[in-house]
Amino acid sequence: MKRKLLITGGAGFIGSHVVRLFVNKYPDYQIVNLDALTYAGNLENLADINEKSNYIFEKGDITEETFIDALFQKYQFDGVIHLAAESHVDRSILDPLAFIKTNVLGTAVLLNTARKHWKGNETGKLFYHVSTDEVYGSLGEEGFFTEETPYDPRSPYSASKASSDHFVMAYYHTYHLPAIISNCSNNYGSNHFPEKLIPLAIHNIKNNKPVPVYGKGENVRDWLFVEDHARAIDVIFHQGRIGETYNIGGFNEWKNIDLIQLLCRIMDQKLGRPEGTSAQLITYVKDRAGHDLRYAIDATKLNKELGWEPSLQFEEGLEKTVDWYLANEEWLQHVTSGAYQQYYQEQYQKR
Ligand code: NAD
Ligand code: DAU
């Protein structure tokens, strides 16, 4: 039977890679991409698949109950992959309520609507919630996040994601809504909005602007190429066990300052600058409030149960990413004009 799939947040960074993968790989599925097109949503990300016959875009807000109900009525979805969210930690510090609204209320509206439409007919349905490793809090020098690590969110963003995860599990246990969650580490790759560390640094290096490094640059993140995350979502959506959580990670930890140094070397090469030129732009600025020290994912369960593993070495992925940004100047110009400038001032001027 033809599957009817709702993907939320498909015009964003990770969502656009997931939509592309599913539209191209599953021509028999009808894929509806629902996105509110906030500052982070951009239909240019999907220009290459826009005309595909199995793809439909719907503009709308996941917090609007009546609209979401009408959408389920119209398409009779049998699967949901939920990515729509406010996703940037620094913005959650500036405006926490926006995160509670979209990430908590929006997820609850989707869950409730799926429950209503699937009630008594749950077989073959799946609500797949895409979450983050930040729900587990902050690690010290050692250890990894496993699926059993207790939740300990510490930013408004991670608290809102943790809350949404709890609602997913509450709907699974209380109403038997077929649900799965995955918690992934930091993604990087093409179409990443330049408020996040890697695309922001690429953009600034290219334009000879200071590269802001928070605190001493000693915080550690575990980086995964975004297309590998999309592949993991595909595998989990089709083969994951209902009611389970799967951690997704790159086995690829980097201190921020080491990552930025590597990026500066790649940028020098690509831009034909003498080695060491870009590194002079590195500027230590005031630390992020409540800055989590280290994230590191243990993705053994996903590897052992479903055979997934990352496909790319970090250096290779980072080079591919830089190449994409250098070849897509117009995309960068579009997303950094207007409101981006205002955000940048507010976020960085006093640091
Ligand atoms: P993003 O900010 O690039 O994209 C979010 C998308 O959601 C945008 O297209 C935006 O327009 C849309 N959106 C926002 N509010 C909406 C609303 N109320 N209704 C409908 N659409 C709305 O985010 P991303 O980095 O692609 O992250 C996608 C998901 O993956 C999020 O749930 C995030 O928590 C999770 N995640 C991200 C990372 C990462 O490193 N970026 C890692 C792990 C998990
Ligand atoms: O771990 C998964 C999470 O990764 C996702 O859930 C989030 O949606 C995603 O934004 C990301 O969160 P981080 O806060 O880790 O990503 P960000 O790119 O904002 O920051 C990465 C690290 O770099 C972090 O330690 C803060 C630091 N940083 C960030 C910015 C924007 C800087 O030093 N300077 C900066 O200008």
Image: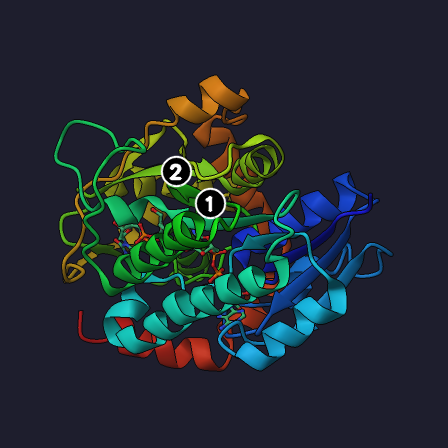
Q: CA distance from mark 1 to mark 2?
A: 7 Å
Q: Which residue is located at x 77 percent, y 41 percent? A: 26
N-terminal label among 1 and 2: 1
**Left or right of 292: which side holds 298?**
right
Viewer can see residue 9: no
Viewer can see residue 132: yes
Name the quadrant containing residue 346.
bottom left
**Left or right of 327: which side holds 346?**
left
Q: Which residue is located at x 52 percent, y 42 percent? A: 226
Q: Position of residue 258 (x, y in %)?
A: 27, 37
- Answer yes or no: disc 1 within 8 Å of ligand 1: yes
Q: Position of residue 160 (x, y in %)?
A: 31, 62
Q: Position of residue 42 (x, y in %)?
A: 61, 67
Whether pointer 1 and pointer 2 mark residues with C-beta atoms closer than 8 Å, the reply is yes
Model colouring: rainbow
Looking at the picture, which amino acid does disc 1 mark?
A: Tyr
Q: Secondary structure at mark 2?
A: strand
- Answer yes or no: disc 2 within 8 Å of ligand 1: no
Q: Which residue in the protein does label 2 denote?
A: 223
Q: Position of residue 77 (x, y in %)?
A: 69, 58
The quarter in which the N terminus is drawn is top right
The quarter in which the C terminus is drawn is bottom left
Q: Nearer the viewer, residue 131 or 317?
A: 131
Q: Which residue in the protein does label 1 denote?
A: 188
Q: Nearer the viewer, residue 237 or 292?
A: 237
